[in-house]
Image: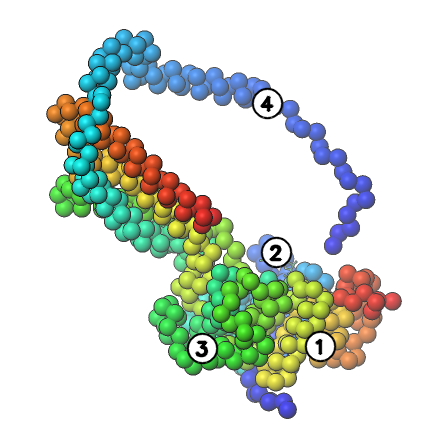
Amino acid sequence: MNKIKSQGSIRFTDANIVYPNGTVGMKDLNLEIKPGEFVVIVGSSGAGKSTLLRAVNGLNRMTSGRIEVDGVAVPQKDGRELRVLRKRIGMIFQDFRLVKRLTVMSNVLIGRLAHVPGWRAMFNLWPAHDKEVAMQALERVGITEKAWVKASQLSGGQQQRVGIARALAQEPAIILADEPVASLDPVTTHQIMQDLVRINRELGITTLVNLHFLDLAKKYGQRIIGLRFGELVYDGSAASVTDDDFRNIYGRDFTEDDVLDEDVVG
Amino acid sequence: MAPTSPHPTRPPPKPARNWPLWGGTIAFLVAMTWWSAHGIGFSLAELFCNAAGGKRLLQESWPPDFGFLPRLIDPFMETIYIAIVGTVVGGILAIPVAILAARNLTLGPIIWFADRNFMNILRTLPDLFWAMLFATAVGFGPVAGALALSVFTIAVISKLWSESLESIDMGMPEAVRACGGTWLQMVQFGAIPQGLQHYVSYALYAFELNVRASMVLGLVGAGGIGMILETQRANFEYERVTMIILAVLVAVLIIEQISESIRKRLA
Ligand SMILES: Nc1ncnc2c1ncn2[C@@H]1O[C@H](COP(=O)(O)OP(=O)(O)O)[C@@H](O)[C@H]1O
Ligand SMILES: [Mg+2]
């Protein structure tokens, strides 16, 4: 059942990120993520969840320390090396980030940009193989019938599926999902979370998901990482995480704002 | 989420108008106008005294010489051609100039600074200057006119478009970067789709300006309708001059209506 991959390991060693205005985004982080893990990162707003995710693909630069992906340090400046790394790391965003006026297919093909010669992408002359990869990515999220529809005509859940398909089209070793369900309704939220879990099982892609809903973290996470003021304050399995652990991560009692299905509280 | 206060707060009282500032500004404007009018020898009294001469000129200019109309077609088309070539050449060259001048897309502070200054130089010098410059290089005529308008078009589009590019949502460009895209791909797939409508709109606007500018350039020898106007005026053919002015008025209005309706539809 599980196609075990040996790619997609991430290691943080004494990693620090201080933003130019002095805000600490990441503090002395030591963390190891194994190939194929499904990790949910929780923490209140501003805890450093996005900072952590964006450090993995070099969108955020470190002040000190080291992050390695499959044993190779994440380059800290723009250039070919960083692009080579990013080619293997898909990213999914809260706001989907699609080109609304283009078709679903064109959006998914953006995931192939780093895989084809520049002139081909520039003139929209995609090799058959890459179109096939994009179509298979759409198949995996079950929206092949929308391939030639404009992205602007899709519902939020469908747009996020296109976002996932674009990441899959990269044939990535790692997927980073930054609050992928924060702008979706509860039903769609569960569907998208199930998609992410299923893809992780089927393809063995290491998956890091930022969530701020506790019940979602517990329900879908395999491993849960808790952040507070940029520091790692919890690291354990989702099965054994307790309400006390969550209280500690959030530094306060949690309320119905922290869960998706309100009846879970109390 | 911060809890919202149960009592809506009253808006603060409207600040009182700053009367000394207003009074000072108006006095300054009046003084400036009086001083400037004096400087160029402009006076309302003289304007009335010259009215008689103006009346004679008007009589000589009426009725317009409609028989002259067919001979206007070729020069008019030449004016349009000059405007089209200027808009297309300038419109294409304006693309990189605008992108590199947008703070959020540029390739680095040095390139940004150089490009900004380049744009400022293009904009500071008037189109007549560029026409003279190109005339010395390729000789007076339509080509010099089209080149001058190309420069003018770069100036217009790059200024407007770089500013509108600076206000795009950087989410999509970042997404392109995140999947390993190059700078050029970030621009092509992340930024341009958001800026395309504005670009087309500014290009059409530049074309409208170019049609008018191309007539003015004709006056100094760049060909087209402006040149005919100048030769007829020099020959005191005032009824033909009236005809030309009427034709130009109608043509420009039509072109602007078409262009404006396209731009409206884009917005
Ligand atoms: N570009 C930035 N410049 C300055 N401060 C930032 C920047 N990005 C994030 N921060 C700050 O860093 C902290 C962590 O932010 P973030 O990683 O976005 O948190 P989270 O995703 O958990 O809400 C917050 O205090 C935030 O305000
Ligand atoms: Mg965040």
Q: Earlier in the sequence, mark 2 or mark 1?
A: 2
The amino acid beneath tag 3 is Lys
Write the residue at 51% across / 58% down: B170
- State the mark number for residue A55: none
The answer for which chain carries disc 2 is A
When the figure is inspected, residue B19 is found, relative to residue A83, above or below; the finding is: above
Write the residue at 27% across / 47% down: B84
User: Which callout, 3 or 4, points to the residue nearer the camera?
Assistant: 3
- State the mark number for residue B18: 4
Q: Quadrant of the N terminus of chain B?
A: bottom right
The amino acid beneath tag 2 is Gly
When the figure is inspected, residue B181 is found, relative to residue A34, above or below; the finding is: above
User: Most extreme residue toward the front, as rendered?
Assistant: B67
The answer to which image quadrant residue A196 occupies is: bottom right
Residue under label 1, please give it. Answer: A221
Report crowding for label 3: few under 14, some 14 to 19, many 20 or more residues within 10 A (C-alpha): some
The answer to which image quadrant residue A214 occupies is: bottom right
Residue B92 rendering spot, x and y as whole percentages: 31, 54
The answer for which chain carries disc 4 is B
Residue A118 rendering spot, x and y as whole percentages: 37, 71
When the figure is inspected, residue A127 is found, relative to residue B57, above or below; the finding is: below
User: Most extreme residue toward the bottom, as rendered?
Assistant: A1
Residue B103 rendering spot, x and y as whole percentages: 45, 52
Q: Is residue B12 in sight in this rendering?
A: yes
Residue under label 2, please give it. Answer: A22
Q: Are marks 3 and 2 in contact (CB under 8 Å)?
A: no
- State the mark number for residue A131: 3
